[in-house]
Image: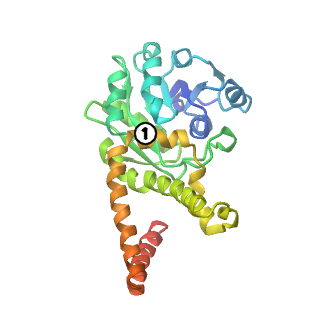
Amino acid sequence: MASTEQIYFDKVTIIGTGLIGASVALALRENRLCRTIAGFGRKEENLKRAKERGIIDEYNMDAATAAAGADLVVLCTPVGILKDVAVSIRTALKKGTLVTDVGSVKGALVAELEFVMPDGVDFVGSHPIAGSDKSGIGDSRGSLFAGARCIVTPTLRSSKAAVDKIIALWELSGGLVECMDPFRHDEIFALVSHLPHIVAYALVNAAERTDPGCVEYSGGGFRDTTRIAASSPELWRDICMLNRDNLLNVLYSFKGTLLKIEQCLKENDWAGIEKEFSKAQKLRMSIDK
């Protein structure tokens, strides 16, 4: 067991023990950032498995009971139910409890979650960029956040002490932390995360609708491009709902890019096609540098 100086939180509660929630628990445990980890989730079988694997120490099928006495609560549920979950646990939170989340939508949701918190409890939003099309604890690992960017979204209501603790939590888990306005966060991730998922879903559906059964002939290109279409439809429905306006804006821009390529094809403008592809190639290659 770690010494007292190494332990940031006596009790941590993970609400939602899927891939991210279980990985948060493992990162906390492996980096000796807490003493006890409690879990809550919709499926008791999953919680039992998490306890058997040593991911959590205890669990409860009632979220408020699981959160009672916690120094840190990490909300790892789909973003569509974050507010409802926060409401359900608010009366169980003691003064001094710190609450964060791992959702990929922030914006107005951050303000709503701040408002739900009782006096003496701080909410600071987080978004570790370390997700996957997988969603179960079988793929969880404490190193998931090592080298991964993590966005923390404080507001004018956030206390410096609370923000500093959340930053330390992710940095000590290996994350590369950057603070960002919640609304700016949603503008950026509508483009680089939410739109790609929509496109992947649409591409799979378009292929099947145009030529039923053709996807069985797909190679690496189609599979790589559409890998994220294997993600949870429920999760991405909620993300679309909560980031609707930004997504409508980026979809308009994306359609404009497609129309430009379509026009080049109609006009046999192969130089124009190559120009579009070259520009994209250079930008894409710069990501990996």
261 lies left or right of 227: left
Residue at x-position 57% and y-position 43%? 232
Q: Which residue, as the protein is rendered here, is positioned at the far right?
A: 52
Which amino acid, mark 1?
Answer: Ser
Question: In front here: 252 or 16?
Answer: 252
Res 16 visible? yes
Q: Which residue, as the protein is rendered here, is positioned at the far left?
A: 156
Is 193 placed above or below 35 here?
A: below
Crowding near the residue tagged with mark 1, few <14, some 14–19, many ≥20 C-alpha atoms within 10 Å: many
Is 2 placed above or below 107 here?
A: above
The number of numbered badges drawn on the structure is: 1
Relative image position of residue 199 (x, y in whole percent) = 48, 57
Q: Quadrant of residue 216?
A: bottom right
Circle 1: element type:
strand
Quadrant (top left/top right/bottom left/bottom right) for the N terminus: top right
Q: Quadrant of residue 272?
A: bottom left
Res 104 visible? no
173 lies left or right of 220: left
Relative image position of residue 55 (x, y in whole percent) = 66, 32
Residue at x-position 57% and y-position 16%? 62
Relative image position of residue 238 (x, y in whole percent) = 46, 38
The image's colour scheme reads rainbow
The residue beneath circle 1 is 126
Is 273 placed above or below 75 here?
A: below
Relative image position of residue 126 (x, y in whole percent) = 43, 39
Question: In front here: 1 or 200?
Answer: 200
Residue at x-position 48% and y-position 38%? 102
Is 230 placed above or below 288 here?
A: above
